[in-house]
Image (tube, rainbow, N blue to C red):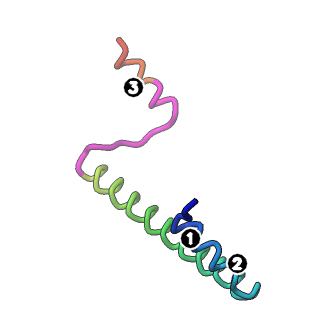
Amino acid sequence: MTSTPFQNILERIEQLPVSDQEALVEIIQKRLIELRRQEIAENAHRTIQAFREGRASYGTVEDLRRELEELDE
C-alpha cells in the first residue's frame, strides 16, 4: 500500500522531538489565524464596496423578513 504525501508528512513530523512538534503546531495555528484574518478583511472590503455601489443594504432581521415576504407576493 502506498503512502500519500499527507501520510508521509505526518510520519516525518512524528520523527521530530516533541518540542519541535509543539513549535510546528504553534506556527501552523498562527498562520491559519492570519489566513482567516485576511479572509475576513477581504470579505469586509467586498461588503463595503457592494454597499457603496448599492448592491447591498443593512437593516434588522425584521426588515429582511419583510423584504423576503414582499418577494413572495
> In terms of secondary structure, where does tag 3 sit?
helix
Amino acid tagged 1: Ile
User: At label 3, which amino acid type do we have?
Assistant: Glu
The residue located at (51%, 29%) in the rendering is 62
- Residue 28, x across and y down, in percent: 59, 76
Q: Residues within 10 Å of mark 2 (few under 14, many from 20)?
A: few
Q: Which residues are magenta?
A: 53-65
24 w.r.t. 50: above or below: below
Other-residue count near label 1 (Cα within 10 Å), few / some / many at <14 / 14–19 / ≥20? few
| Image quarter hosting the N terminus | bottom right
The residue beneath circle 3 is 67
- Nearer to the camera, 44 or 29: 29
Is residue 3 covered in magenta? no
Mark 1 highlights which residue?
A: 33
Residue closer to the observer: 6 or 53: 6
Residue 57: image location, x then y, percent: 36, 42
9 versus 65 height, above or below: below
Q: What is the quadrant of residue 33 in the picture?
A: bottom right
In terms of secondary structure, what is the magenta stretch mainly? loop
The image shows residue 69, relative to residue 61, as above or below, that is above
Q: Earlier in the sequence, mark 1 or mark 3?
A: 1
Residue at left offset 35%, top offset 61%? 45
In the drawing, what numbered circle is on residue 14?
A: 2
